[in-house]
Image: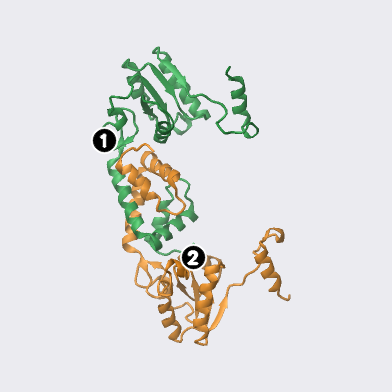
Chain colours: A orange, B green
Amino acid sequence: MASLGPSIDELMQALRCLPGVGPKSAQRMTFHLLERNREGGERLARALQTALDNVGHCSRCRILCESELCTRCRDERRQQDQLCVVEMPSDVLAIEQATQYQGQYFVLSGHLSPLDGVGPEALGIPNLVEWLDSGSIEELILATNPTVEGEATAHFIGELARARQIKVTRLAHGIPLGGELEFIDSGTLSHAFSGRESI
Amino acid sequence: MASLGPSIDELMQALRCLPGVGPKSAQRMTFHLLERNREGGERLARALQTALDNVGHCSRCRILCESELCTRCRDERRQQDQLCVVEMPSDVLAIEQATQYQGQYFVLSGHLSPLDGVGPEALGIPNLVEWLDSGSIEELILATNPTVEGEATAHFIGELARARQIKVTRLAHGIPLGGELEFIDSGTLSHAFSGRESI
């Protein structure tokens, strides 16, 4: 590939750290920013630096936030006896948007993956155990992703809670609303069939 | 959408200036940068600011570059009598990569689009006319995109060159290599058919 200069090459390379951005998209983004939207580029550079400087993790629930405790952990009106464990901050946003849940969250920032060296410490599970040991939690809601790793992580955390006589629940699996039976994968369908409910 | 804090919201908004990035991708990119790849984020913020500070346009061919004249315009071994007009800097890279062309380029940074207020001045056509008037160009190669706007722009520039007795050529249109007749759009096929060559 012919080069247009070191700063342009470096920008194309640096853009590839974004998820889903390959060489072609990075080139397109570079030309767009430099040819057509320099103001947008300035804003992005500033926003990125500000966020990197200011954003850390909530010391209680580990979600991304800009202070010691996030707004949800500071909010005393929320229920203190329910704790929902999720993999990513985006899962918290999705649950907040879709449900009436008013309890606490704990963000793992990933799932157990021994082959990649992601063990319980990397997911903050010692903090979670401390929280469970404090005696304030009555129900632990497992909302990890329905993948092999997510299920394994949920199982691991579920055992920790059961050992402390805490009620453990997990999100219901089944046919998504608006789905057509014909197009649902057989794993989900078999799960939904065997877990049929009386109406 | 629940908010995680002003810096995070601002970063999500700012990322949307990138082409092809909507709200969902922006959120994914934000979490990826802040949760998993802060080094990549720092590098991106630095690279973006450096590029915005250093990269301008070549005063001769208008390509993005970091000095007064780009490397191609400074290279005296390149042919001085051929000039290829393209819409975008990426087109120059594509031609350099695919062909043996050793002449000059002129980058319009767009195409004529009167409805959007893009006239000849915005495309640097006065500079192009000056170049054509200098008498050094023997062949003007039109390599704008084969879209309605690109063709109109090519026609406009072609007339300017013809008025100065400069030979005007444009890239051949036809069936792409490796294409299957069955799947080629009818405009291209009819163009290729009427422009058939004897072998």
Label 2 near label 1: C-beta < 8 Å? Answer: no
Taking the image as shown, residue A187 lies to the left or right of residue A138, namely right
> Does residue B193 sit above or below A185 in this rendering?
above
In the image as oriented, which residue stretches furthest toward the left?
A: B68
Q: Chain of mark 2?
A: A
Residue under the image location 39 percent in, 26 percent down:
B101
Q: Provide the secondary structure element on which disc 2 rests.
A: helix
Q: Are marks 1 and 2 on the same chain?
A: no
Label 1 neighbourhood size at 10 Å, few (<14), some (14-19), many (20+)?
some
- Which residue, given by chain and number where applicable, does mark 1 sit on? B67
- Which residue, given by chain and number where applicable, does mark 2 sit on? A93
Q: Nearer the viewer, residue A137 or B40?
A: B40
Camera-near label (1 vs 2) is: 1
Label 2 neighbourhood size at 10 Å, few (<14), some (14-19), many (20+)?
some
Where residue B79 sits in the image (x, y, percent)? 33, 22
Residue under the image location 63 percent in, 31 percent down:
B181
Residue under the image location 42 percent in, 56 percent down:
B12
Where, quadrant-wise, is the N terminus of chain A in this rendering? top left
On the question of residue A11 being in view, the answer is yes
Query: Picture quarter containing residue B164?
Result: top left
In the image as oriented, which residue stretches furthest toward the right?
A: A199
